[in-house]
Image: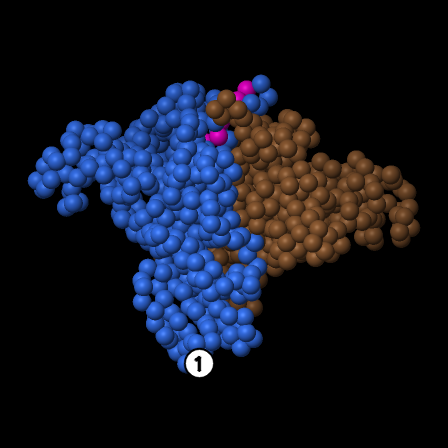
Chain colours: A blue, B brown
Amino acid sequence: MLQSQLFTETTKEAPRDEKSLNAKLLIRAGFVHKEMAGVYSYLPLGLLVLRKIQDIIREEMEKIGGQEILMSVFQPKDLWLKTDRWSKGIGKDMFKCKLNGSEVGLGPTHEEIVTRILKSYLSSYRDLPKSVFQIQTKFRKELRAKSGLLRGREFDMKDLYSFHSSEEDFEKYYKIVIKSYHKVLGRCGLRAILTEASGKGFTSSTPHEFQVIAPAGEDTIFYCLGGDFSQNKEVAKVKAGDKCPICQKTLIEEKSIEVGNIFPLGIKYSEALGAYFTDKDGKKKPITMGCYGLGPSRIMGAAVEIHHDSKGIIWPGEIAPFQVHLIQLQENPEIKKKSREIYDTLLKTGIEVLYDDRDGKSPGEKFADADLIGIPWRIVVSERTLEKDSVELKRRDKEEIKLVKTKELQTFFKS
Amino acid sequence: MLQSQLFTETTKEAPRDEKSLNAKLLIRAGFVHKEMAGVYSYLPLGLLVLRKIQDIIREEMEKIGGQEILMSVFQPKDLWLKTDRWSKGIGKDMFKCKLNGSEVGLGPTHEEIVTRILKSYLSSYRDLPKSVFQIQTKFRKELRAKSGLLRGREFDMKDLYSFHSSEEDFEKYYKIVIKSYHKVLGRCGLRAILTEASGKGFTSSTPHEFQVIAPAGEDTIFYCLGGDFSQNKEVAKVKAGDKCPICQKTLIEEKSIEVGNIFPLGIKYSEALGAYFTDKDGKKKPITMGCYGLGPSRIMGAAVEIHHDSKGIIWPGEIAPFQVHLIQLQENPEIKKKSREIYDTLLKTGIEVLYDDRDGKSPGEKFADADLIGIPWRIVVSERTLEKDSVELKRRDKEEIKLVKTKELQTFFKS
């Protein structure tokens, strides 16, 4: 993409009421625009990142058998009354609108809707197991929303729901999802700690969270470096300094970010909404369910919290808006021509390039913008490099600058 | 995709309260699920169609310089008060939720938000023109929603906004968008009539609609077959039987579907929200704007209204969920093996295939399902066809059945 065409520009200042580091950097670099507390619009660069995260999630969910659907945002009141959640639990945090003398809710989660849809199609043990997922804008009435993309009133969510004929079958799938979530988060540049969220011990019949250690996190967890144990402080029966009950190492306390969570739902929703199947023995039984959430917008915020320095963002490769930031340093025609040639060659090689072809910007401004935006590779074309038929190549996360022959660039990025 | 894995199935009946033809067919074929009046969830097949429509729109909008963004659903009240729309005009149809003692709206359109975003970045005539678009779930308080996907309370919308330094520059772009919209709709299998929506005559300074003739449409238009003239009845100064003021042919009256609309916004929003730029002459001027809507979910409904027969849907090629419906007619191992081979070969050729590998279904049931689902090409593998090393090939919209040698299939679909 030609940077001269991009309508956004970087800014020196974030809005004064913005306290969160991820939002400040994302706003200053032109990735998002703040509409109100906890509500952001995605600008071209931000939407590219969000899509890459969504695509990674989509790919991994399909690998574990998830079929993608898109459920309604609107939640019928009568359905939520059946599960007794309209005014209780998460229903208390649900935004509600008036419609024809009644009310509709804005989905913060979709157990009711998904159970009603699937029960039309699942009637026999032969139809099970099945799992479906969606990637969707969700809404939640947060009274205070001050952590940028980490806790939105409007946010992006992937929710997967699984349907099983037995608790054992569910437990098998639960473990598959845990593995898949670690893979998704790893591809997004995050190392997450699987954390108990119930205090009942480490079994598949209790909920778990995926926690990423970062100062901006709103959660506190106790965990052991060996990776054997992690508990959310809210439910913990241990404290910092205690020994890990498994490996005996000392437990560490850390303010962390919950980027995903997984819940055994048992038969709560299938019983309340009448989702039964006929088992091999001819008996009617309620379907056993699981629910698995992962927040693309929250992952984007967490990636910025973890991967940045004093100059700006440092995007992990797979979720960067572009792979290469190509900078034409001076405005002379020879440099413009050569930069354009390199741009075209890289595009042809399948490399995603943001090409800083802007006139009227000093080298200092261009470097500062590149550091703030945070694309993994920077290529600089200047009078000095062209004298040696070369370009300057630098990784965003390293100090070292290499001179690389222009004709070798294509081969370099191919490998 | 293996049809045995798909969690949806076709049904003989649509919900009793569903009156609309498009929704009845889409529900029966397993494309959508009705959650309440005017609110549908997209099941795997339906989401495939919706995505294809979105991708066509995205591609064409990028061709005319649109930069994709994703704005917030939530609309701040103070912003809509500035344009005097919170309780007037479209604001009356806006769903509203309570938040911290105030209210937020759910976006039925985004002029306010987009103008506030863009004004941060557009300050000089050098920054203009620019155009941005989003594809998003939108909300509108329809008191009666009874036309299926044609008029939803929750619906999918592409909205493009353009920003110009002069009325002339806007008018040039307006014509470019008209051409682009015809192309999008053509690719989606719809022939639309550009229709005046203001009664002020055919100029770029009045709004226009893209109308598709169909009995289910909620609009009435007068138009001439020559394509020179079309007016919405709501604003028309003509009546059926009048002569076309341009070509003198007799005007026809028709109940049609509005699938898109385009509006000159002038400087209404830029003045109200302070979106000014400095022109070549050094003077500060308000930015001239245009707004262009196109409904992917409504296009999906309209395509079904136009393209169906008594047996089911007949998808236009580019928006069909799959290109080929491969049917393994009997359950013997030889047929299963051969069908699987054909499936793999077609996939390798880049053809999208729904493979009916289901056991326990009669040939009659499989044919009826294929007709209802409406994939453009049907391939049948049976004992009879395999005797001749062939398959049966049939287009959904034709009666003719051809016998084609199995080894020629790949070449056939490549061309």
Q: Answer yes or no: is residue A223 visible.
A: yes
Residue extent of the magenta highlight: A102-107
Provide residue A45's location: percent of width, then percent of height: 48, 53
Instruction: Name the subunit of mark 1.
Output: A
Asked if residue B328 is among those painted magenta in the image, a careful observer would answer no
Depth order, front residue of B314/B79: B79
Provide residue B293's location: percent of width, then percent of height: 65, 45
Q: Which residue appears at 48% of the width and 68% of the height? A: A329
Asked if residue A104 is among those painted magenta in the image, a careful observer would answer yes
Q: Quadrant of the C terminus of chain B?
A: bottom right
Extreme residue toward the left, this view = A248
Q: Which residue appears at 25% of the width and 35% of the height? A: A220
Identify the main secondary structure in magenta.
Answer: strand
Depth order, front residue of A204/B274: B274
Provide residue A302's location: percent of width, then percent of height: 35, 45
Q: Is residue A167 above or below residue B365?
A: above
Depth order, front residue of A153/B342: A153
Q: Which residue appears at 73% of the width and 52% of the height? A: B166
Q: Answer yes or no: is residue A63 visible.
A: no
Depth order, front residue of B135/A100: B135
Would residue B182 be found to the left or right of residue A132 on screen? right
Provide residue B148's location: percent of width, then percent of height: 61, 35
Residue type highlighted by circle 1: Glu
Write down the residue under mark 1: A387
